[in-house]
Amino acid sequence: MAAPRKLSLRRQLLIWLLLPQLVLWLAAAFVSYSVALRYANEVIDRSLAESSRALARQVKPLGDGLYIDFPRAAREILEEDPSDRLYYMVSTPPGAFILGEKDLPATPSDLARQFGHPYFYDGILRGKSVRLAALYLRVGTDERPQTMLVQVAKSTALRTQLARDIFIDTVLPLSMLMILTSVLVWAGISRGLSPLRHLRRLVENRSPRDLAPLKVENAPAEVRALTSAINTLLGEVNTQVAGQRRFIADAAHQLRTPLAGLKSQTELTRAELSEAVPDRGALTQRLVQIETSVARAIRLVNQLLALARAEPDAALALAPVDLVRLAREVSMDAVPRALASGIDLGLDEAPPQLLIAGHDALLRELLGNLIDNAIQYCPAGSEIGIRILDSGDSAVIEVRDNGPGIPAEEAQRVFERFYRGRMEGQGKGCGLGLAIVQEIARHHQAQVVLTDTSPHGLTVTVRFRLSP
């Protein structure tokens, strides 16, 4: 089961800052609409109260009855706007209709009557929602008191429209302000996280060989603390790696001298034994085996020393190196070893000069290991060719042979240290040659490719960038 994907710090900050803003915006929108509706109700109620009092003034007591002074023209004025029509009814409770609309909603049964003060409530008139004002008045004489009810109603559509307009006029600027705030929050987060992005680029663009302290300027205290912790770790790693390199280099230097002396003493002993005892027999054969073992030990020590030098090291300076000159010198040094093994070693025609940015000693070790590997694993009578090519934007070293080659399934593993695979027993190598080649190539940002040679054999290609 795949692990849940973690949110980035930017997304978490955006969520925790913008989500409350959205909640507050929704709450503000709800409050704005409620306030707008309340103010719209107040406007409608004030209008209904004025209309109810104006209508009540048109009904006057006359003797034992009521005189209604409400001309038709006034009625037409009240009813002429269909979208804002005013409905009205005058009655004397408990149900004596006098004037207006008979089907106006009745007043709520729990309404406490207070004469001369309008009451407001909602109702349904002919399937439409209306807002009503009810005004109770005392009429008549003291001997025959009467109660008059004046009801005035208006559709709530106008109230809803008014509340909607107020809501839009309030929420639209609020929305624009929220968008502007969100943009500012996003910009602020981006600006605040820029030191972390800069630190990430410093780490991503850094070579694995570079263990120098990171430099972050004008950064917040938290980023400086993180950088300090990383620099402390890099310092400890650098100290350990440097100690390991010194140990390998010192061990190799210490081993080379006694091994070289042992080899010289073995050669001298064998020569003296050959002169003193013509029939040297098995003793001479043992000395030859000792000499061979010492030679292999010396080669192993030299390769370990070369591998220690080829380990990632940012302090190793690169300089222009002529590959053509280097190939001539290394191949000439290897000719005696090739002749001793019965192998034909040759350098193909090359350009006059081909410069790359590199380390001369390491590049010599690289080409020397390629040639030595070919000599070690090719039988007598084989041919080894060295070619230097200029491919335009890169320089190429090719070492090809017609030996047994490398099986396809082992083409990648041969770059591992001390790995020999099926080649074990075919040569005298220690399994470090191609590992050294790979390390040196990585140091020079070069590519190493193994290719089968038809009908049999191997071609090792190393491609370098040309020096400007």
Image (cartoon, rainbow, N blue to C red):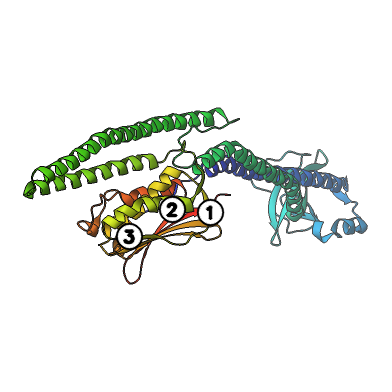
Q: Secondary structure at mark 2?
A: helix
Image spot of residue 267 (x, y percent): 19, 42
The residue closer to the viewer here, 210 or 360, is 360
Taking 266 as reference, is 34 left or right?
Answer: right
Badge nearest the viewer, 3 or 2:
2
The residue closer to the viewer here, 370 or 164, is 370
| Residue 353 image label | 1
- Type of amino acid under label 1: Gln
Q: Secondary structure at mark 1?
A: loop
| Residue 121 image label | none
- Type of amino acid under label 3: Ala
What residue sits 75% from the left and 53% below the top? 161
What residue sits 36% from the left and 32% below the top? 240
- Type of amino acid under label 2: Ala
CA gap, disc 3 and disc 2:
25 Å
First of labels 3, 2 by sequence position: 2
Taking 420 as reference, is 71 left or right?
Answer: right
First of labels 3, 1 by sequence position: 1
Taking 253 as reference, is 112 left or right?
Answer: right
* Residue sitting at the far bottom: 455
Query: Badge 3: few (under 14), some or many (20 or more) residues near its Cα, within 10 Å?
Result: some
What residue sits 44% from the left and 29% below the top? 232
CA gap, disc 3 and disc 1:
32 Å
Image spot of residue 137 (x, y percent): 79, 42
Residue carrying label 3: 411
| Residue 327 image label | 2
What residue sits 60% from the left and 39% below the top? 189
